Image: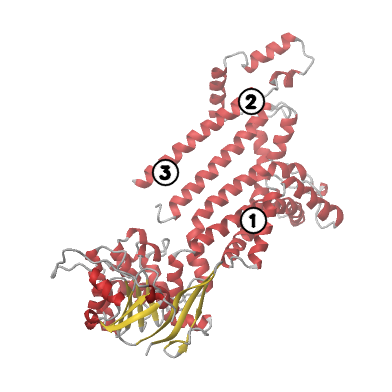
Amino acid sequence: MLVRMDNLRVGFRTPQGVSEAVRGVSLTVGQEKLGIVGESGSGKSLTARSILRLLPGSATVTADKLEFDGIDVLSAREGALRRIRGKRAGLIMQDPKYSLNPVMTAGAQIAEAWRAHKGGSRRQATKAAIDLLAQVRIRDPARVAGLYPHELSGGMGQRVMIAMMLAPDPELLIADEPTSALDATVQADILRLIEDLVAKRGMGLMLISHDLPLVSHFCDRVLVMYAGRVVEEVKAADLHRAKHPYTRGLLECLPSLVKPKPQLSVLKRDPAWSAPQ
Amino acid sequence: MRRIKSLSETLSSVLVTLFGLAVVTFMIGRVVPIDPTIAIVGDHAPPDVVAAARLQLGLDKPLPVQFLIYVQHLLHGDLGRSVMSSHPVTQDIAQYFPATVELATTAIIIAMLIGIPLGVLAAARQGSRFDQLVRVISLGGQSVPVFVLGLVALLVFYVKLGWAPGTGQQDVLFDGTVPRVTGMLVVDAALNGDWDATSDALAHLALPALVLAFFSLSTITRMTRAFMLDALGGEYIVTARAKGLSGTRILWRHGFGNIAVPLITVLALAYAGLLEGAVLTEVIFSWPGIGQYLTVSLLNADMNAVLGATLVIGAVYVGLNMLADLAYRLFDPRVR
């Protein structure tokens, strides 16, 4: 198992006391494609980012167990964390418009990630960056390497982001809503790219999304989160047989081309779903 | 093509600003209750002498005509003659300005070398003791007037402790021994190979430069800190951390790398502010710069000199702004 997480809790200190955003999540990730779905604020991003301890400074994290390949992430020093971040687990974020450094060229940002973990000369790193850009199917990699983020389209930016996170050959890829900021046609391209690369490199994947059909189509296993907790875990193929009323409600809300409904139902929330356990 | 267009826009806006500057200085010269003729011929001159002087200065002509003549002279590089020194004002300014440049440049370099790291580190440790201390110091620089600071510094370091030499640019011992090349005494003495004179000039430069530096240090620190806080909140910082980079590299390459260009504007303005703010410091430290020249001319109602010096300081301000603007266009990939 790459990731073992037991009873993870993430809270934020507020003047009114600690407000818990993640309330006891347990999960494991191996060399598989794990999907985490949930609405905004359900804690799915925080859960994924705690694996790399990439939370804002105001957050407090506790867990009975939080391990990456046997390394205790919670007690690890900054140096040990840096040997996990990027090198063994990459993080793809939502919008390349904000997640790429605006004053560095695409090539320089990829080369930096490569060099940070593999060493080597500047020239080697630049060559590796161009090679990686070709791997994420950018047509003119040498030219794109010299472009700044504002000169890239959303899809190209996300490819650069993926290339950057693949540079040190990680074992786990965390994709935090990687397609939410992209056009529908580009979304499919990027997902197919991620799928291919994950299969080819034998990586584990954590795909975080609020798009149920996409995740069920794409992943092996799906966790459904609500109000900071995992309310349901199902095999992706069995999603239509989900039992939890929240998951059922979400599925009911989706329009379908095959079985059109005269009226879409509305999700009715039950306070019991988010009640403390 | 876009670059040429933006360049010409910058240049034309500079020309408009310079024209405005000329109008304002001209109007000041005509509005102040000082009669330039009296300054020349004296209080007790007979009326016909005064009238002749007025005629000679062109003061009998209507204001717009006077302005046209003023601008025409300006374009020929003629700022008129100083009553006090009886030299052309341009010659006086060439005499005094290098000393101001020397002082302000030293000050801005000190302020940059201290202020930028302070601001960056304070932002990196926002809310810490270090951050609080930096904020108090920079608030001090902002609120203590430069003349208070200058006098206190002289009292402490010259009068009480004797660490610093007195006022002026050099010791009387070296007076007139250094041949004038650039007008900046430290540089001239070093060029001449006279190390005693060089170290003496440096010692004299230290205190006024430090006082001036403290003045703009606060602005530079505060702006660096604010820019950095903004940059460090960016998503690309999370990306940089996710890449497993070191804290130092994230701070300087990704954080500071994003604020370096906007910071140039702050530095240019701070430098211009020093050239201007040097007026008081120069008076306190008897520094023979343009601020000193301006003050003495003002007290003697030597209007040509006052207007000329004002115009030069204003033009330098506009010029530095233009350079900052150009630097922005050259170095920021998003503007380029």
Tag 1 secondary structure: helix
Left or right of B252? Residue A88 is left
Is residue A51 visible to us here? Answer: no
Amino acid under label 1? Ala
Marks 2, 3: nearer the viewer: 2
Q: Which residue is mark 3?
A: B7
Quarter residue B54 falls in: top right
Amino acid under label 3? Leu
Give the letter of the chain under mark 3.
B
Q: CA distance from mark 2 to mark 3?
A: 33 Å
Tag 3 secondary structure: helix
Q: Position of residue A124 (x, y in %)?
A: 38, 76
Which numbered disc covers residue B29?
2
Disc nearer the start of the sequence (2/1): 2
Which numbered disc covers residue B111?
1
Where B315 sits versus B255, above or below? Answer: above
Q: CA distance from mark 2 to mark 1?
A: 35 Å
